[in-house]
């Protein structure tokens, strides 16, 4: 059996020498997937990330908060407090999905499958954020100008914007 593995290893090395571009693409892809898997944010990292972002926002006076940033953070806090925010680890990336109802809620509209959308439609409609490569994309986009109140800037005359 060891001889078989040795033969496969030799043939793989020869194949890499014969087609170096293909080998480079394959190994680069495998390297990227390994990196994506290792840096995929977990649920605990999500909670730490939200805590860090709250601390970052606390350091800025409320009058200077960007409304989009505040809305994004408040919506996640709202979903978390109602037990409606779910983290799905999909190996190379993570999804944050908000459900329509709390998992413990047992009312008719939350249980009847005839009143629900297709699972894929419901999933697509309720995606809150996508996390990959160690960050959450929508939240990072919302925090770009977290200390600039765009409502105040919109009130300025056109020449001063």
Image (cartoon, rainbow, N blue to C red):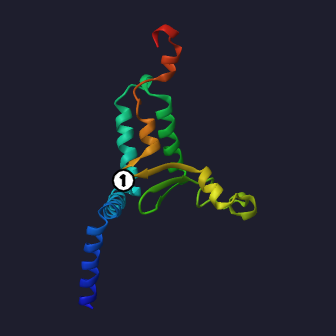
Looking at the picture, does residue 127 appear above or below residue 150?
below
Q: Quadrant of residue 36?
A: bottom left
Task: From the viewer's side, name the closer residue of 40 and 13.
Answer: 13
Please give left or right for residue 18 compared with residue 135 in the image: left
Find the residue positioned furthest to the front.
Answer: 18
Q: Which x, y percent locates residue 141?
A: 44, 38
Mark 1 = which residue?
Answer: 45
Q: As rendered, which of 121 and 85 lies closer to the eye?
A: 121
The x and y percentages for residue 130 are: 47, 50
Image quadrant in which the N terminus is located: bottom left
Q: Residue furthest bottom?
A: 1
Q: Residue furthest right?
A: 114
Q: Secondary structure at mark 1?
A: helix
Q: Residue at x 50, y 32 (%)?
A: 68
Vertical order, 123 against 50 (above or below): below
Left or right: residue 30 versus residue 101 is left
- Residue 16 relative to residue 83: left or right: left
Q: Residue at x 24, y 89 (%)?
A: 3
Give residue 107's quadrant in the image. bottom right
Neighbours of disc 1 within 10 Å: few (<14), some (14-19), many (20+): few
The residue that appears at 53% across and 44% down in the rendered structure is: 78
Picture coordinates of residue 143, whole percent (x, y): 41, 35
User: Looking at the image, how many numbered discs can be counted on the residues?
Assistant: 1
- Measured from the top left, where is residue 9 in percent x and y? 26, 78
């Amino acid at each position: 059996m060891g001889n078989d593995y040795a033969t496969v290893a030799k043939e793989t090395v020869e194949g890499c020498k014969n087609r170096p571009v293909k080998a480079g693409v394959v190994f680069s892809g495998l390297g990227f997937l390994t990196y994506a898997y290792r840096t995929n944010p977990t649920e605990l990292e999500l909670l730490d990330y939200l805590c860090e972002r709250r601390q970052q926002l606390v350091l800025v006076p409320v009058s200077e908060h960007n409304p989009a940033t505040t809305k994004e953070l408040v919506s996640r806090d709202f979903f978390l407090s109602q037990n409606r925010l779910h983290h799905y680890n999909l190996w190379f990336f993570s999804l944050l999905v908000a459900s329509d109802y709390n998992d413990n809620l047992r009312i008719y509209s939350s249980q009847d499958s005839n009143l629900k959308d297709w699972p894929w439609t419901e999933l697509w409609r309720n995606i809150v954020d996508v996390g990959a490569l160690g960050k959450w994309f929508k939240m990072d986009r919302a925090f770009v100008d977290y200390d600039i109140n765009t409502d105040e800037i919109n009130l300025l005359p056109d020449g001063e914007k």
